[in-house]
Image (cartoon, rainbow, N blue to C red):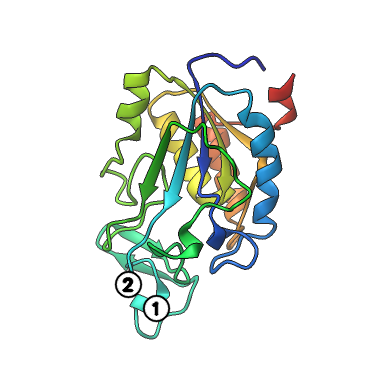
Amino acid sequence: MTQTPQDVLIVVDVQNDFCPGGQLAVASGDAVIVPIQRIAQHFQHIVLTQDSHPVGHSSFASSHPGKQPYEQIELPYGPQTLWPDHCVQGTRGAEFHPKLNLSQAELILRKGFRREIDSYSAFFENDRTTPTGLLGYLKERKLNRVFLAGLAYDYCVAYSALDAKRFNLPTFVIRDACRAIDLKGSVATIEAEFADAGVKLIESAELLG
């Protein structure tokens, strides 16, 4: 697959708390770094997303007495999975993994910084209506084909991919450059949604030529 100047690689949440030893570690989460570093050399444009939660965020189980991580509750914007405290602003867990070396990235997009609402997608908060501004950025830069990698495949990567397709952007998820949580069959569910929406799954080798 040949890259063009209109392509953008969006690297999602490769942060210490989502990697082994972190507060919300994805199994083998740090294994995404090598393929990401390899494919990044083939993109002129790279965006990084960064989960950035204040203390006491509404998605934390600790903010809801009697609730445990991975339970689901209803918040004003709809159902919300509760998570362990993670990616708290100013902590090491919120920092990018030290082996992720993408100094050429043009934008770091922080999300989840509003205490009252979570944000999986790089495009919208979890109310599905409050924009992050990423779409406007891509339009102004005339970046119109989206490739995604990072953590977690079945949450923040997936929601970002589905939203990109909502805007009729050709969207590709680089499967071997992602790792999943797979909570209650979430991988199978999201892959069915990918198929329905037209999100394409590819391997990093397809980008290397």
Q: Nearer the viewer, residue 154 or 136?
A: 136
Picture coordinates of residue 71, whole percent (x, y):
46, 72
> Where is mark 2, residue-wise?
56
Neighbourhood count class around disc 1 (C-alpha, 10 Å): few under 14, some 14–19, many 20 upward: some
Element type at mark 1: helix
Q: Residue flagged by tag 1: what amino acid is it?
A: Ser
The residue lying at 63 percent from left, 49 percent from top is 99
Residue type at numbered disc 2: Gly
Front tag of 1 and 2: 2
Cα–Cα gap, marks 1 and 2: 7 Å
Which is more N-terminal, label 2 or label 1?
A: 2
Q: Return the x and y of residue 47 as percentages of the image width and height.
A: 46, 34
Q: Which residue in the protein does label 1 denote? A: 62
x and y percentages locating residue 164 in the rendered image: 43, 32
Q: Say the numbered circle drawn on residue 199.
A: none
Q: Is residue 209 left or right of residue 61?
A: right
- 208 is higher (above) or lower (below) than 203: above
User: Does dot 2 land on a helix, a strand or a loop?
Assistant: loop
Task: Depth check: give the residue in front, 146 or 71.
Answer: 146
Which residue: 26% across, 44% down?
Answer: 130
In the figure, is residue 150 to the left or right of 109? right
Pointers 1 and 2 in contact (C-beta within 8 Å): yes
